[in-house]
Image (tube, helix red, strand yellow):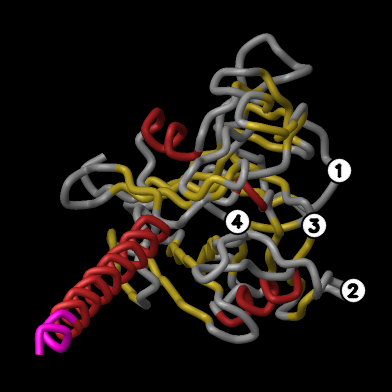
């Protein structure tokens, strides 16, 4: 009888240990999942008019892979809307820009929406201890740009031109250039993806486009390099997304770790990184980049 009691007690202890171990394992798994997604925007679709004439969309795609897209559309005909490209520094024609994060640009110039812009040099991204640029370091854009009629860089590829009346065109300026930003390549021309776009390499992406009349601006940022959250898009997929959201013509801007979307909360005034940038393979880390494209949308300006 005593032996039976001892066996029973031992079984109860083993059950208790198994239960505790199971609870511990579940808690550990929950903590790991929470830590992985902490700070990232929830993968939940939404649409919101943040400011008059400015609409933000978050779209979650599951095929052909997990991909989160952030889209902002802007009606350039509205009186509360204006744009800004990062201004050049005075007296430095070789490296006319001082590098900033996209959120740093948004705060410094008080724009309500901001995305990263053109590629730039010099640039390296080896380790957390070996990268360039840091905030304030001199860089130059890959292509042509202009900010409030101050031009910098060289025309090498496709460019978005905007004059002082907010007339926006691709490829050729309409009247005097007031703002301009260049892209890495064309994505869309006349409602069609340009031929031979890469359809295999997935990465974070940033693009800017216009509808047919040139009055509606479309900005898209795709998160990437984050398994089980958002893996990224090919250039071909980026073109197709741009067409879906009304872009008749569009440029592929700098991508990868540079891809960032920042919006000022209209209620609190706080600046929010709307996507999940990833620099040096660290989710949530913003890359310091050359130039940016911003939108003024605050009716109280």
Q: Distance between the residues labelled 2 and 1?
A: 20 Å
**SS category of the residue bearing label 1:** loop
Q: What is the crowding at mark 4: few (fewer than 14 residues within 10 Å), some, or many (at least 20)? A: many
Q: How far apart are marks 4 and 3 (CA)?
A: 18 Å
Nearest-to-viewer mark from 2 and 1: 2
Give the mark nearer the N terminus: 4 vs 2. Answer: 4
Q: Distance between the residues labelled 4 and 2?
A: 26 Å
Contact, CB < 8 Å: mark 1 with mark 4? no
Q: Report whether residue 174 is seen.
A: no
Q: Name the residue under label 2.
A: 196
Q: In this view, does 171 lie above or below 193?
A: above
Q: Which mark is residue 168?
A: 4
Give the mark nearer the N terminus: 1 vs 4. Answer: 1
Nearest-to-viewer mark from 4 and 3: 3
On the picture, is 276 further left or further right than 95?
left
**SS category of the residue bearing label 4:** strand
Q: What is the crowding at mark 1: few (fewer than 14 residues within 10 Å), some, or many (at least 20)? A: few
Estimate the x, y position of residue 45 in percent, counting from the top left. Answer: 37, 77
Q: How far apart are marks 3 and 2 (CA)?
A: 12 Å
**SS category of the residue bearing label 3:** strand
Nearest-to-viewer mark from 3 and 1: 3
Q: How far apart are marks 3 and 1 (CA)?
A: 10 Å
Contact, CB < 8 Å: mark 2 with mark 1? no
Part of the protein shown in magenta:
1-6
Nearest-to-viewer mark from 1 and 4: 1
Q: Residue at x 69, y 43 (%)?
A: 118
Q: Name the residue under label 1.
A: 156
Give the mark nearer the N terminus: 3 vs 1. Answer: 1
Q: Name the residue under label 3.
A: 185
Please name the predominant secondary structure of the magenta segment in the image: helix
Estimate the x, y position of residue 27 in percent, counting from the top left. Answer: 27, 65
Which residue extends farthest right? 196
């Amino acid at each position: 009888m005593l032996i039976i009691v001892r066996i029973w007690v031992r079984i109860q202890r083993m059950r208790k240990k198994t239960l505790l171990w199971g609870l511990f394992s579940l808690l550990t798994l929950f903590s790991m999942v929470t830590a992985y997604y902490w700070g990232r925007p929830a993968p939940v679709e939404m649409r919101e008019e943040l400011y008059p004439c400015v609409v933000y969309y978050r779209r979650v795609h599951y095929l052909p892979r997990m991909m989160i897209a952030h889209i902002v559309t802007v009606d350039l005909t509205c009186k509360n809307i204006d744009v800004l490209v990062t201004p050049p520094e005075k007296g430095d024609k070789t490296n006319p820009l001082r590098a900033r994060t996209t959120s740093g640009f948004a705060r410094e110039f008080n724009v309500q929406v901001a995305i990263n812009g053109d590629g730039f040099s010099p640039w390296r991204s080896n380790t957390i201890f070996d990268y360039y640029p840091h905030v304030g370091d001199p860089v130059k854009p890959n292509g042509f740009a202009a900010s409030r009629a101050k031009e910098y860089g060289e025309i090498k590829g496709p460019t978005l031109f905007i004059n002082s009346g907010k007339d926006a065109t691709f490829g050729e300026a309409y009247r005097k250039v007031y703002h301009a930003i260049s892209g890495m390549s064309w994505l869309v021309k006349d409602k069609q993806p340009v031929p031979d776009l890469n359809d295999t390499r997935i990465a974070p992406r940033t693009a800017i486009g216009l509808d047919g009349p040139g009055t509606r601006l479309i900005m898209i940022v795709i998160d990437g390099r984050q398994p089980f959250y958002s893996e990224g898009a090919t250039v071909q997929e980026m073109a197709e997304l741009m067409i879906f959201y009304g872009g008749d013509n569009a440029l592929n801007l700098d991508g990868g770790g540079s891809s960032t979307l920042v919006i000022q909360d209209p209620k609190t005034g706080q600046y929010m990184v709307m996507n999940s940038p990833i620099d040096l393979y660290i989710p949530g880390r913003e890359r310091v980049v050359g130039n940016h494209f911003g939108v003024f949308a605050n009716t109280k300006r």
